[in-house]
Image (tube, grey):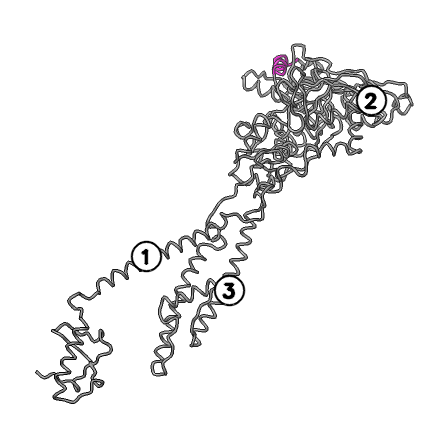
Amino acid sequence: MAVETNLASKDSHWVFVNEEINDNEILELVHSALGRMTVIRQIFPLSRDNNQRCMRNNHRISSLLCDPQEGYLQMLQVSNLYLYDSVLMLANAFHRKLEDRKWHSMASLNCMRKSTKPWNGGRSMLETIKKGHITGLTGVMEFREDGSNPFVQFEILGTSYSETFGKDVRRLATWDSEKGLNGSLQERRLGTDLQGLTLKVVTVLEEPFVMVAENILGQPKRYKGFSIDVLDALAKNLGFKYEIYQAPDGKYGQQLPNSSWNGMIGELINKRADLAISAITITPERESVIDFSKRYMDYSVGILIKKPEEKINIFSLFAPFDFAVWACIAAAIPIVGVLIFVLNRIQAVKAQNSSPSSPSASSTLHSAIWIVYGAFVQQGGESTVNSVAMRIVMGSWWLFTLIVCSSYTANLAAFLTVSRMDNPIRTFQDLSKQMDISYGTVRDSAVYEYFKAKGTNPLEQDNTFAELWRTISKNNGADNCVLNPSEGIRKAKKGNYAFLWDVTVVEYAALTDDDCSVTVIGNSISSKGYGIALQHGSPYRDLFSQRILELQESGDLDVLKQKWWPRMGRCDLNSHTNAQTDGKALKLHSFAGVFCILAVGLLLACLVAALELWWNSNHCHQETPKEDKEVNLEQVHRRMNSLIDEDIAHKQISPASIEISALEIGGRGDYGSELPGLLLSQETLDFGS
């Protein structure tokens, strides 16, 4: 009405007190009106208790009303919210009266009667309603003696102006019955208000955003890091100075059961600090109590995990084939050797009546097996193949050998390639499906709440985050979660643990690791980012946002990112080995099995040679003739000459025709082998008596 009648002029200031007004209507009013505007409305913060989010007092509520990030509850009409809670509160009172057996029966009502007696149990029912402590859509419903609800909260919205962003709506303050007014109703126009001011800055140590620098003795503690560089750039552009200190509890900020906040958020709410800077993410819950500047860096969640250690298997050369394949190959060699030996024997029987030929190399069983083994290892060998059957056998064996060797070579190359591939855990899905590695994050952190919201969302179709949240929240987060990021990084470096945290933080930890033993995988897609936190209703929010946009457009932020996250660091995030080593070179342990086989073969050969030497020496010693069987050749010749001379007189025999075939002296055996040149024939020599 005021806009239609031109009453919302430039110099006017309208105050709307309306519980039914929603965000869209407020924005429409602000942009259509020319003057200032203040809106006061009731807010209904949802309980953070998991048991009360989607199941309130055993009454199932639509999932759209359960997620505080949806903002759907604020769009409903307040009258509908109160109507639902009124019925819920009345039903709870009836239930309690019946349990206490204090129900007062009531007479039937007649609308035609002019005089109706009041219900005797009405006052008792009112007292029961006041004592009922239940939680509905409007929050906690509890009443004082005067019938007022101490948990009612209101917010005060007002228009703001800036040269950069123009006209906008921001929350100026909040009000509740316990704390009263929280915030400032005075609007300050943005300009050069920061020139010469000294701001109190609260921070939390988080590498590489904020770290303690080397301090000079006697000087205040100094800090360094990416966020500190961004703050220095803003201070230089805006002309302010700052005093920085760490949050007393070292936390970013979490809402406590009593609705208060700890950490840096609590420092801002309690106005002990003007702004907070570190790796603090912009979340709807935090934005409900403080203000954020524009994001100066995107946010996502990564997995910090130890690189898989390369398993040393000296017999990895047998990996391309299964054990059953090797067993069949080992059995095929002697079988084919026996078949070749049998075929060779059959061929020998057929050739008995034919002309004699040179003996075959496969005439014995061990020779046939040796030929088959030589063909398998592609070393060839001299073999005489005469029959068609043997040629078919050898041709089939050669083809078999070709296929087996080619398959082994290709499979070995693939096996060596796969052994150098990345970790099998590459995504959140892979992490949720395995059970060998435990994983977690920092308890009560923004990442913790992120997985909590995703894992408990009934509209989430993929059960990946549900499985992740089931493991992370085991024993209320005490089993797998850590207290701070440093503890999670140390736990991940020890192995058998995956740390889920801001990808920028874990990437810096992986890049600067002394041993290059960890890597980062599985970045999540998120619309969140890192920003500078300010007090609720701070007049400097738009000024900081404007300067951050200027730093992004000029490329100064990219230069700072390259400074703290170098592309070419000491460690390589894309490999699972040290960046200084050649990942393509085969190491000694890859050939350890080959050298072992060679060593076993050499030792076996030496052992067999020693056994042969011992056997031959022992066998020859047993067959050596005795000394009494030795013959003196001079005595034999002297005796033969004497006999010849005596017999010349009787028979005329030429000495050249004498052929000694055998000589036996005193029954000492046959020594014809000792006298190859002397053969004595019975036809030419007759010794008589």
Amino acid, disc 3: Leu
x 52%, y 54%: residue: 412
| Quadrant containing the C terminus in the rendered view | bottom left
Mark linked to residue 42 = none
For label 1, the SS is helix
Q: Which residue is mark 1?
A: 610
Crowding near the residue tagged with mark 1, few <14, some 14–19, many ≥20 C-alpha atoms within 10 Å: few
Q: Is residue 128 visible?
A: yes
The quadrant the N terminus occupies is: top right
Residue 320 vs 271, above or below: the answer is below
Residue 402, label in figure: 3
Q: CA distance from mark 2 to mark 1?
A: 102 Å
The reply to whether the magenta stretch includes residue 122 is yes
Q: Main secondary structure of the magenta part?
A: helix
Q: Nearer the viewer, mark 1 or mark 3?
A: 1
Residue 155 x, y percent position in the rendering: 74, 19
Q: Nearer the viewer, mark 2 or mark 1?
A: 1
Where residue 458 sits: x, y (%)?
62, 35
Residue identifier under label 2: 160
Q: Is residue 537 magenta?
A: no
Quick one: label 2 or label 3, which is nearer the N terminus?
Answer: 2
